[in-house]
Amino acid sequence: MPPSIRGCGCNERSAYFMNGSTTMIAATGASASRGLVFLRRLLANRSFSMGLALVGIVVVLALLANVVAPFDPIKGNFKARMVAPGAAHWLGTDHFGRDILSRILHGARVSLQIGFLVALITAVAGTVIGATAGYFQRADGPVMRLMDAFMAFPPIILAIAISSVLGASVTNVVIALAIAATPHTARIVRASVMVVREMEYVEAARALGAGHVRILLRHVLANAMAPLVVRVTYVFAVAILNEAVLSFIGVGPPPPTPTFGAIIANGRDFIVAAPWITVAPGMAILVSVLGLNMLGDGLRDVLDPRMAVNTR
Amino acid sequence: MIRFILRRLLASIPVLFLVSLLTFGLLWLVPGDPASMFLDAGATAEALDRVRREMGLDQPFFVRMGQWYVRLLQGDLGTSLLLNRSVVDAILERLPVTLSLTALAFVVSVLLGAAAGLLAAVRHGRAADQGMMTLALLGLSIPEFWLGLVLIWLVAVSVPLFPAGDYVAFTTSPLQWAHHIALPTFSLACVQMGFVARMTRSSMLEVLGQDFVRTARAKGLPEPYVVLRHGLVNAMVPIVTVMGIMVGALLGGAVVTEQVFSIPGLGRLIIGAVLSRDFPVIQGGLLFLALIYLVVNLVVDLLYAAIDPRVRLQ
């Protein structure tokens, strides 16, 4: 399934995704009440609502980092180095005397931003590539062979190599992670486009004289989006994990930018003397990724009732 | 079957070519001069020239590409700028370490993951099911390198049950090897364990709802026999199809895990090369990892075709 197993959950299912359930979010022109029904079904799903709550808390805290963070995330205080968690510093401080809680809150901002951008770029690139390969049969072979070649590299290694070659910066980390996540996403879009392409309403549109672009956008893609939505949620989660790996290794955004991975990398050498530096940001990653995974599971359950029967 | 194998082998040739092209093209992504990125800013012009020559950067692009392919076909990946030795030798020396870690994590994650998934499916809807699935979700969401660090802190330093790092070759002492590799294996296998557990469970539930399972129960076969022989054997078929991707993910994870536990494998070689911009080693490492992935996927496809004859006709 996923290039990284974590990105998964959806793709082997995409093959039998077209049980008539995919129109739910695809109904762009549908009435508001239909959207409301869909929303209600989503919120009734326990996994989705719990995931939404977790992600919501993390996002709000990240957005309010400037307000809620008690200290400056970058400026150190040499009088308060490696202070254990307590009243003054809830999560302790690192070897520069920087408040861990403040660094995590600001780090969430950077990490979530990276995750979001990676998800967005991957969704767009994956859709363009996957739809081209799935709809235009002549492009299928060459395009998918190229995707196969990309997928031959472990995604995290590909991202490490690209990030190191491009140089460390937030932008380059986003590029590297998006390149690593796109091939598999393209494959998922392609699979669902190939199913929808054969539908009778597509044939009807063609018979009515609609052009390729119109058919692809209005009829095929609009009805092939469900697997993508689920996949992109997982891509978001995996991007947060992989950003942490890049920062940990030393090819992430340059210091002193706080990111989840950078804080852990700082704490690594003090794992015995000051374990709180390492433990707390890891928990922050865990909560964010867990929330996104639950969100993805919930979306999958609702968008694909056939699987929902199995996973409930 | 022979026709299927031949067709599958032929199909992998263009992918192999593209993989090598991508690996070569990586250098092209470097903004500016790769030689000056390897050396410090204060490097002399002579030193720069020497590194450029070593990397072949004094040649035109297509000449360089031609040379890369000629050498590649001879099994030569160039010389490491940092270690000043053959890239292939350096990689082959470290490969067994990475492969043993990956293979062990693979076995552990399939066995424990399948067991957890099986338990969850059999106890569908009960506490054991929910417990297993919560664990699996946690496993999928945990950053593996962080888990490694926390394990070092908890069971290697605070309570010294395991060594905190280093590596002992299997050939030196199998017992020491197992002791040293236990923590890395566990932290690496965690993600895949969750993945396998979830897949086994949903696949198992689907199989247990099939008519042949009902028939088996109806004719009075003992329940454990039905669950294992009729259920699990069929439920594992989808797992076989994703084994290739699992190995890819494990290889990637191993690179990072080696870094955490100071294991002298391919991962440490690649990360070291990444940090010092030793481009020939980065390219060589990428190529080897991709090659392993392609070979594993070839084996998986053949295995799948052997299990399910319908695949051969597609």
Image (cartoon, helix red, strand yellow):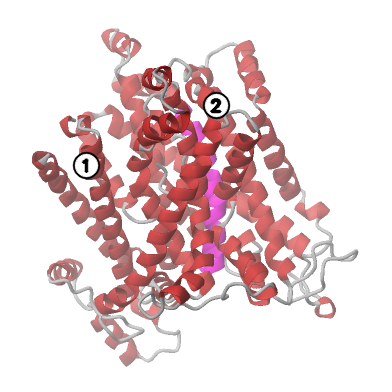
- The residue wearing badge 1 is A142
Locate residue B269, reporting x and y percent. 39, 75
- Which kind of residue does numbered mark 1 sit on? Pro
Residue A228 located within the stretch drawn in magenta: yes
Magenta span: A226-251
> Above or below — where is B130 with respect to B61?
above
Q: Is residue B282 left or right of residue B259?
A: left
Q: Is residue B9 left or right of residue B190?
A: left
For disc 1, the chain is A
- Which image quarter: residue B132? top right
Please determine if labels 2 and 1 lie on a single subunit: yes
Q: What residue do we see at 32% from left, 10% from top?
A: A200
Locate residue A294, reporting x and y percent. 61, 37
Q: Local crowd at mark 1 within 10 Å, few (<14), some, or many (≥20)?
A: few
Closer to the chain start, of discs 2 and 1, is: 1
- The residue wearing badge 2 is A301
- Disc 2 on helix, strand or loop? helix
Q: What residue do we see at 22% from left, 38% from top?
A: B305
Q: What residue do we see at 28% from left, 53% from top?
A: B296
Cα distance in 3D space between marks 2 and 1: 34 Å
Q: Are marks 2 and 1 in contact (CB under 8 Å)?
A: no
- Which kind of residue does numbered mark 2 sit on? Asp
> Above or below — where is A142 with respect to B271?
above
User: Magenta part mainly helix, strand or loop?
Assistant: helix
